[in-house]
Image (cartoon, rainbow, N blue to C red):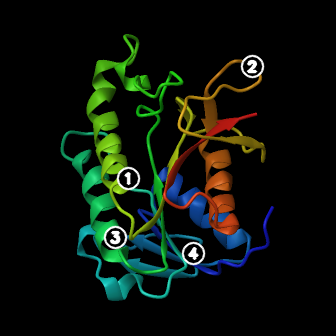
Amino acid sequence: MAENTTKKIAVVAASGRVGSLVVREARDRGYDVTAIVREECATPAQHTLVRDALALTPEDLAGFDAVVDAIGGWTPETIPAITDVAIYLADILAGTNTRLIVVGGAGSLFVNPEHTATVDQGTDFPEDWKPLSAAHGAALANLRQRANVKWTYVSPAADFQADGARTGVYTLAGEELALNAAGESTVSYADYAIALVDLIESGAHVGERVSVVSK
């Protein structure tokens, strides 16, 4: 693992399931962490900024080495925020040295070497999940068009397990759906958080989408 040279990060939606794990992982590694939340809440972060993500200003995010976008959504009312916040944060961070690390989706991972077919185009992909996948995919498509933002989009495995074990081991893959040694595409939220903070530490994969799968 690379030496921790990134000391100051902000986590947007820090009270969520993924965001809270990223906060704890980063804090435990010695980062100076700011939790950005819509309402006051308990958090292991050293600092808290109560602000709606779409009300953040460039001044709010100035001086951070990395900003993690952990916005989620499951309802018709909340799903659009996944795209909106990613685009908004990219606009704010454009032209700066601050990295934007986006918690992405698995539906847009490719399932063929030609990169013409995606997970969410499969016949077994649940219809109810398609709006969520489309929102994540739209965020990724927007980021791909930007050369002045130091973004990294991190897709989980297809089976993203909220209560899965923290094993501390994972495989960092690329644009295609990857399987583990058991032939499964799965990763726990906890191991995903480890991988995400590792990416911040390494400084690698700027301007790229990567994916995370369990060993």
Tell whether 175 sits left or right of 183: left
Helix, strand or loop for disc 1: helix
Q: Image height check: is 18 above or below 116? A: below
On the image, the x and y values in percent for residue 88 come to 27, 66
Tell whether 119 sits left or right of 89: right
Q: Which circle's residue, 3 or 4, is located before the other in the chain?
A: 3
Q: Image height check: is 150 above or below 161? A: below
What amino acid is labelled 3 in the image? Glu
Q: Which mark is residue 39?
A: 3
Residue at x 60% of width, y 38% of height:
163
Q: Which mark is residue 144?
A: 1
Residues at circles 1 and 4 in contact by the CB criterion of under 8 Å: no
Q: Which circle's residue, 3 or 2, is located before the other in the chain?
A: 3
Helix, strand or loop for disc 3: loop
The CA distance from mark 3 to mark 4 is 14 Å
Q: Which mark is residue 45?
A: 4
The CA distance from mark 2 to mark 4 is 36 Å
On the image, the x and y values in percent for residue 118 come to 41, 26
The CA distance from mark 3 to mark 1 is 32 Å
Residue at x 35% of width, y 74% of height:
94
Packing grade of label 1 (10 A; few <14, some 14-19, many >=20) is: some
Which callout, 1 or 2, points to the residue nearer the camera? 1
In this view of the protein, which residue sits in the foreground, 91 or 131? 91
Q: Which residue is mark 2?
A: 182
Q: Image height check: is 41 above or below 5? A: above
What amino acid is labelled 1 in the image? Arg
What amino acid is labelled 2 in the image? Ala
